[in-house]
Structure formats: structure tokens, C-alpha cells
Amino acid sequence: MNTRTLTLDRHAAARRLHAFYVLTKPRVNTLIVFCAVIGMFLAEGSGLPSPAIVLAATIGIACVAGAAAAMNCLIEAGLDARMTRTRWRPLPTGELTARETLLFAGMLGGVGLSVLYTWVNPLTMWLTLATFVGYAIVYTVLLKPRTPQNIVIGGASGAMPPVLGWAAVTGDVSADALLLFLIIFAWTPPHFWSLALYRSADYARTGLPMLPLTHGPEFTRLSVLLYTCILFGVTLLPYATRMSGGVYLAAAVALGGAFLRYAWRLYVDYSDALARRTFRFSILYLFLLFAALLADHYLRF
């Protein structure tokens, strides 16, 4: 075998590895893992969680989240092929087969659950499994094709990461962990509907009952504004319950005010470009809000 053939083989192998990597939706997975890790540190009180637990829980949660994303890609391969936003994914392009995707998801999920059960605790494993089922089956198969409220109901799965992180460290789920869940649960609709607004033509090709298609863009913009108001109130609860202090409160008010400004402008003066900026800001918003929770947590001790 000559050098050129070896080089081509390596490039082909690298492309296939990258295709499997893409199946895990790495950008979404990064946000999931980040929120889970924040939950781990917030659960520990004034100290630091065990590095071994943090490492094992992070690996386990990331693997199961990646498996859920791969299953979502498998189930929605036909829909992805009709959307500009997703037609480049490995299944629509033919880079990977359905069988390869199913095997990959099964192996990755199995590894993640095994790590959580063996090196973290059974509760975290079962909660993570329930999250996998909630996203890959309940949301993707049952809710998404049937109701425009799919993202509201299905958002419960997406809100679980900090609860998983909390359970990994403490072995239980407290009221504070549920507050973290509630923040992401309230954040999900304005985040996702901002995307659905400027991608409505894409969704129209799939036949999915997305809110801008079933109820119209004006109703969707109003829903984004109302849910952002709800989110603003929910983010004040950690301060109201003394879970956090002034540093977090200042960040929550500032970030919430910025999000409300985006939502209001989206309602009164819509453009696709503004919806795109709102969607991108919503991601930054959640990162910064949870980072503020962590900073406040350790500054108070």
C-alpha cells in the first residue's frame, strides 16, 4: 500500500469519525454538559465536588446526551433531508447508514449509563435514562409531529441537566435543583420559537405543526414575549429562596432585561435577522446566567 493510499484512507476514516461526532449535536451537547456541571458545583455547598464524580458524571451525561441526539437524527432523517438547516447532517447526505447510527447510539448510550451507574450513583443513571427516553421518544416521536406545544412539554427533558448534575453529587434531588430545572424549562420556548420564526419556511416543508405555522407568526412573537416575562420572574426565584445572593440577582436582572428587550423588539418590529440574533442571544444568556449562579455561589462562602 503506497503513501497516497494511506493518506486517502486516513482522510476517509477522519471523515467518518467526524460524521459520528456530528450525530451527537456537539454544540447542543456542550450547553447540556455545562448546565450539568454547574449543577454539580452548586450542589456541594461551600466546598468542591469530588473530581472523580465530576469527571465520571460529565462523561456519562455527555455520552447519553450524544446518544439521544443520534437517535433524534435517526428518527428525523427524512425530515432533516427536507430542511436547509439540517440537510447536511450525516444521514441525509448518506455519510452514515441508519444501522450504523443505531449501533453508535446504542453503544454510546450504554457506555454513558454504565459509567453513571458504576462510578456515580444509580439515581443519576435512572434520571439520565428517563431524560433520554423523554427526548428521543416522548418529544421526537410522540410530541413533535402532533402538537405545536411540543417544545413546551418536551422542554422538560432539555431542562434536566442541572438536576442530573445535582443528583450526581448529592444522590438526591432538592428544591434548589428543581429551581434550576424550572429556569431552563421557562427558557426553552422563547429560545426555540425564535429559531422557528426565521426558519418557518424550512419547517413548512416538513409538515411539522410548529407554532408559527399553526398559529401564525404574530401569535408566536407574542408567545416569545410572554414566556420571556415568565422566564424573568423564574430567574428571580433563586434569590427569593436565598439559594443565591446579590451577584446573581444583578446578573439575572441585567440579562433578563436584555432578553426582554429582544423579545419586545421581536414582537413590535419583526425581522428574520432580529429573530436570528434573539436565538443566538438566548444561548449566550443561559451560559452567562448559570455562570453567574456559580460565581455567586462561591463568592457567598
Image: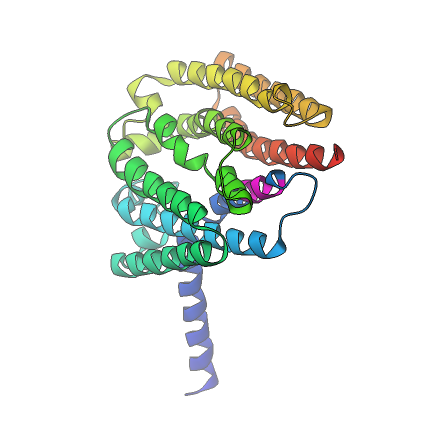
**Picture layout, residue 16 above or below residue 25:** below
Residue displayed at 35% across by 22% down:
212
Q: Is residue 269 left or right of residue 83?
A: right
Q: Was residue 59 drawn as part of the magenta stretch in this picture?
A: no
Going by the picture, which residue comes out furthest to the bottom? 1
Q: Position of residue 162 (x, y in %)?
A: 52, 38
Front-lying residue, 237 or 220? 237
- Residue in view at x 57 percent, y 45 percent: 37
| Image quarter of residue 94 | bottom left
Name the chief secondary structure element in magenta: helix
Instruction: Name the spot of residue 256 as percent of width and height, x first.
Output: 60, 21
The reply, left or right, for residue 76 in relation to residue 276 is: left
Specify the quadrant that holds the N terminus: bottom left
x 63%, y 48%: residue: 49
Q: Quadrant of the C terminus?
A: top right
Tell me the magenta residue range.
34-41
Q: Is residue 88 visible?
A: no
| Residue 37 shown in magenta | yes
Query: Residue 4, position in %: x, y?
Result: 46, 81
Place of residue 54 in the rendered image (x, y in percent of width and height, measured from the top left): 58, 52
Q: Is residue 126 visible?
A: yes
